[in-house]
Image (cartoon, helix red, strand yellow):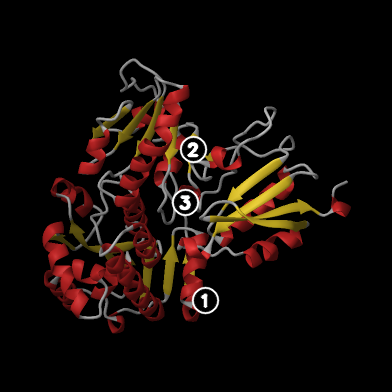
Amino acid sequence: MEHLLYLAHRIPYPPNKGDKIRSYHLLKHLAQRYRVHLGTFIDDPDDWQYVDAVKKLCGETYFARLDSRTARIGSATALLRNRPLSLDYYRSRGMADWITRLHAKLPVSPVLVFSSPMAQFVKPERYARRVIDFVDVDSAKWTEYAAQKSWPMNRIYAREGRQLLRYEREVARDFNASLFVSSQEAALFSGMAPDSASRIGWFSNGVDSAYFSPHHDFDTPYPDGGPVMAFTGAMDYWPNIDAVQWFAAEMLPAIRERHPDARFYIVGARPSREVLALGSQPGVTVTGTVPDVRPYLAHARLAVAPLRIARGIQNKVLEAMAMGRPVVASRQAFEGIDATPGRELIVADAPEDYASIVAPLPPQVQFVARSGPQVDLAHLFVTERDVLARYLALLRKQLKPDAMLWVSWPKKAAKVPTTVTEDVIRELALPLGFVDVKVCAVTAVWSGLKLVVRKELRS
């Protein structure tokens, strides 16, 4: 078999979280066709127990211990060297030396890199074929982080976004193919690295529908009580931390006003101090590590994915959908998932104070969770052009001919990252038969453009 080098920033096992699910199934697939030699890091002491399981799929292996505290301190030197912090975080002389020894021993020609920091270990002249799975546009993630943080972290994160984008472009130029987890991520990076656009592609994540099947008979993990809303994920990951904090502070109190016995379960390993503190809030339970998330999904009334910062595809959404659970997701958590909002899942993304923004309303007005021919008015809040295009096409088919559609996008002064403007809305809406009739300020953050179907198309 042909020899292949596979470099991953985290041990690709067990497949129990987003990146590990993807990297493990890549390894499993490659092992059927190549003699795979794996170089990877272990950043969780519990993961050392899985080394032997990974070795069964590989030829030569190198597992580098990564202590997050030491790595963070070491990465600070990048601030003085015009380098992304992410690269120095994963800097390893041991990894580089192992790769050199591997090449002296075996004819390794192709290389697959999983996550951009691992590309620093690839010398292009060594490999006839070079493929990188970026998964997400990490530089965009750091830029989003910067918008959510205060000084000095906002400055550090913004710098990381700029430096990492420069590095991502260099890697894309040096590699034969650059892959992402969704068409949206691939399109985003193609715009950022136009010179490499012809070599940029994507392949989506899937879900093990037999493992995450609604037909399993699990005992309930919940004590007797009211309906449960469940959030699953690694709870030391900042976007997940931010999501549950926001949900517990902004949504749960309103829900419990109408359903006092409603419960919110946060299910996932390594909960941060901020997450653990939520456990003292009425109605909130933080489980920490559980042996199996499936019983928690199977017996939840619904799964929630209120992420405000997210890139790529959220496996937590796919898993809950596979288990037949209703899913309420933010627009960010919905990105890249081939599902119809309002049918397979509900996308809830309006400002939390939306009801007060539009008040007072006539008593006969009702809010509904999905669009359809009975809806007189729909209001869409968007920050990304491709999301807007998808929803405009969907709503054009679903709304009745004389319905009104308001589209809101962030004002420039709000400093919210966005690819939507008033001109972009017109560019996408007018070819679908809409015409704009009014523009206004909805809130201090959001502007709004009112669209209706042209009169000659309403019959």
- The CA span between labels 2 and 1 is 36 Å
Whole-percent x and y of residue 175? 38, 77
Res 387 → quadrant:
bottom right
Res 232 → quadrant:
top left
Whole-percent x and y of residue 136? 40, 61
Q: Which mark is on residue 63?
A: none
Helix or strand or loop: what does disc 2 sit on?
A: strand
Q: Which mark is on residue 328?
A: 2
Q: Which residue is denoted by mark 1 in the rendering? A: 198
Asked if residue 239 lies left or right of residue 341, the reply is left
- The CA span between labels 3 and 1 is 26 Å
- Identify the image quadrant of the N terminus: bottom left
Helix or strand or loop: what does disc 3 sit on?
A: helix
- The CA span between labels 2 and 3 is 12 Å
Labels 2, 1: front one? 2
Asked if residue 156 lies left or right of residue 427, the reply is left
Asked if residue 269 lies left or right of residue 320, the reply is left
Q: Which mark is on residue 332?
A: 3
